[in-house]
Image: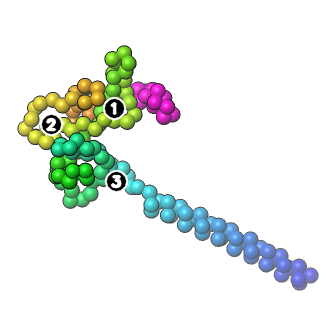
Amino acid sequence: MMSQQNDGRDRIHKIKLGVAVVLFIVAGALAARSLLQDSPADYANDRGFKCSECGHDYAYVIRSGDFEPLECPKCHQRSAYQAEMCFWTKGPDGQYVAKTEPTLVLLKSRIDPTSDEPTYCPDCGHEVVGHNPRPSEALMLEASGREGRD
């Protein structure tokens, strides 16, 4: 009888130990995931830049102490500025349609703050302005479906 009680206690102890190990592994995985994930600040600081010298455009995460112009990773000149995103293109009928991958456009006023000259998207011809507005969510969903990005 005593042996059965000890066997029962051993079994319960093993179950508790197994559950504790599984919980420890799950907690460790969740902690690692949250530590390795980009923070909201990283997402907010991830911007598109375009070089005024060579035209190279690239994504860059702004860090404390950065100032424009940045060094271009392609031509190594300090001539890269934050670009605006244009989510428009021309459809087969010549009408403007939304697209999911933006064209990065360097505003003339970004290079020369005294310039009043408008900047136009090289892809669609739309005028691009600071904080360039995106197409509506409905148009972006339509573009996503048309481009097969559902």
| Residue lying furthest left | 114
Q: Is residue 145 magenta?
A: yes
Residue plotted at (25% across, 50% down) = 74
Can you identify the residue that label 1 sits on? 87
Which type of secondary structure does the marked residue at label 3 adopt?
Answer: helix
Residue with the mark numbered 3: 41
What's drawn in magenta, residue-wise? 134-150
Residue 108's disc is 2
Q: Nearer the viewer, mark 3 or mark 2?
A: 2
Q: Quadrant of the N terminus?
A: bottom right
Circle 1 SS class: strand
Residue 57 vs residue 48, the one in the foreground: 57
Q: Earlier in the sequence, mark 1 or mark 2?
A: 1
So how many labels did they put on this image?
A: 3
For mark 2, give the secondary structure. helix
**Which amino acid, mark 2?**
Lys
| Residue 88 in picture, x, y percent from top left | 33, 28
Q: Is residue 92 magenta?
A: no
Of the image marks 3 and 2, the number of the one nearer the N terminus:
3
Tell me which label, 1 or 3, sits earlier in the chain: 3
Can residue 68 be seen from the camera position used here?
Answer: no
Alpha carbon separation for disc pair 3 and 2: 28 Å
Q: Are marks 1 and 3 in contact (CB under 8 Å)?
A: no
Location of residue 120 with respect to 38 vertically, above or below: above
- For disc 1, the neighbor class at 10 Å (few under 14, some 14 to 19, many from 20) is many
User: CA separation, marks 1 and 2?
Assistant: 19 Å
